[in-house]
Image (cartoon, helix red, strand yellow):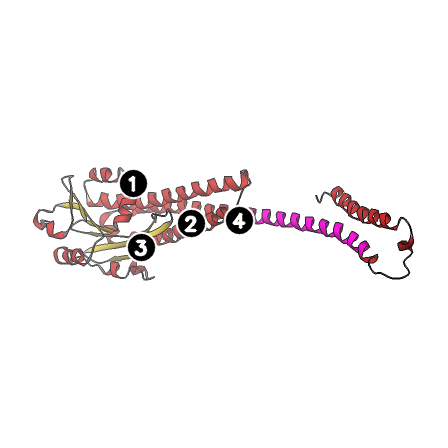
Amino acid sequence: MIEILLKNKRFHKVQSVDELPLSDLDFHVMQFLDYGDSEINWLEKNYGLDFTIMKHFEDIEISSHFLENQNQAAFHFSFPCYNGDKKIIEEPIFIIISQSGLFLFSSSNLDNFLNKMYLNKFKSLRELDESKDILEFQFSFISDYFADTTENLARKIKILANTILIEKQFSNNEMDSITEYNFSNMLVKELLIETTRVFRLYIKSNWAQKMGLKENIRLDLNDLTVVSDYIQFNFDRLDDLKENISNKIDLEQNHIFKMLTVVTVCISLPTLIAGVYGMNFEKMPELETSYGYPIALIAMLCSSILPFIYFKRKKWL
C-alpha cells in the first residue's frame, strides 16, 4: 500500500505503483507499507533514489543507519512496538529525504500500531507546508515515541512493584514479568542508542546544514537523553524488585530451616531414648522396675516438649 500526502493537503492512497500518475504527483510525503521489489525499482527509475541503506540495515556499521550523498539523505531507525502477544519487538523504518520529497518505508503492522497510538499524526502532517518542517516533525515524533514507550513500560513496572512491595505477593508470574520487562527495557535502550547515533551523525552532515535543522535535532537529542535516564531508572527499579524477592525467598528458606531444626530436635531426643531401651541388653535395671515403661514414655514426652518450649522462647516459631 502507498499513502501520499500531496502539497494541496489531500491524501492519496493506492495499492501499487501502477496506479500512480507520475506527472501529477506534487507531494510532500510518500509512504510505502509492506513494500517490495516493484516499488523499489519504480522509485529508482523515476526518482533516482539510492536504497543501499535498506539492503544492509542489519549490519553493525553506522552506514547502515545513516547514509547521505548529493541527492539524498537516508535514515534507518528501529522502533520498539508491541506485537499481537503484547510483547515488545523491533520494527525497522526507513526515511529518505531528497529534492523530490520525503519517502517513508515501514511495515503495515508498525503503521497500524502507530495509528492506534497517535490518532492525530496525519492531521498534524496536513498543517505543514514545507519538506523541512515535515522532516523535523518526523524527528520530533521519534523522540516523543521513545518517551511514550518508556513511560508505558515504566507504568507497568510500577504496577508490578506495588504488587510485590505493597501487597507482598509474588509468584512465578511476577518473576516472569520482571524478566520480560527487563528484556523490553533493554531493547528500548538499545534502539534508543542507535537512534541517538543517527541524530548525531545527521547534525554533522551536509543535509542538516542545507535544511537548517541542527538546533531542532539538538533539542530532540536532549529529550532522548532524558528518556535514557528514565530507562536507567526502570533498570534500577527492576533490580530492586529482584533483590526484594530474593531477600523474601531467603527469609522463607531460613524460616523453613528453623522449622526443620525444631522438628529434628523434638524427634531425635525421644528417638534416642527409645533406641537406648530397645537395645535388649540383659542387665538394664529400668526394664525390671514396675514403672519403667511409663517413666520411659514420660521421658520421651518431656524430651520433645522441652525443646519446643525452648525454641518458642527464642522466637524460632
Q: Position of residue 279 (x, y in %)?
A: 83, 60
Magenta span? 245-274
Q: Which mark is residue 4?
A: none
Q: Which residue is mark 1?
A: 116
Depicted 284 relative to depicted 235: above or below: below
Specify which label sits upstream in the sequence, 3 or 2.
2
Residue under the point 79% across and 52% down:
270
Number of other residues with Cα within 10 Å of mark 1, as a class: few under 14, some 14 to 19, many 20 or more: few
Q: For marks 4 and 2, give the CA distance.
A: 15 Å
Asked if residue 246 lies in the magenta stretch, the reply is yes
Quadrant showing the C terminus? top right
Q: Which residue is mark 3?
A: 201
Q: Which mark lies nearer to you, 3 or 1?
A: 1
Residue under the point 16% across and 49% down:
15
Q: For marks 3 and 2, give the CA distance.
A: 24 Å
| Residue type beneath disc 4 | Lys
Do labels 2 and 1 touch, CB within 8 Å? no
| Residue type beneath disc 1 | Lys
Q: Which mark is residue 185?
A: 2
Q: For marks 3 and 4, give the CA distance.
A: 38 Å
| Residue type beneath disc 3 | Leu
Using residue 75 as the reference point, say whether residue 166 is left or right of it.
right
Specify which label sits upstream in the sequence, 3 or 1.
1
Specify which label sits upstream in the sequence, 4 or 2.
2
Element carrying mark 4: helix
Residue under the point 22% across and 45% down:
132
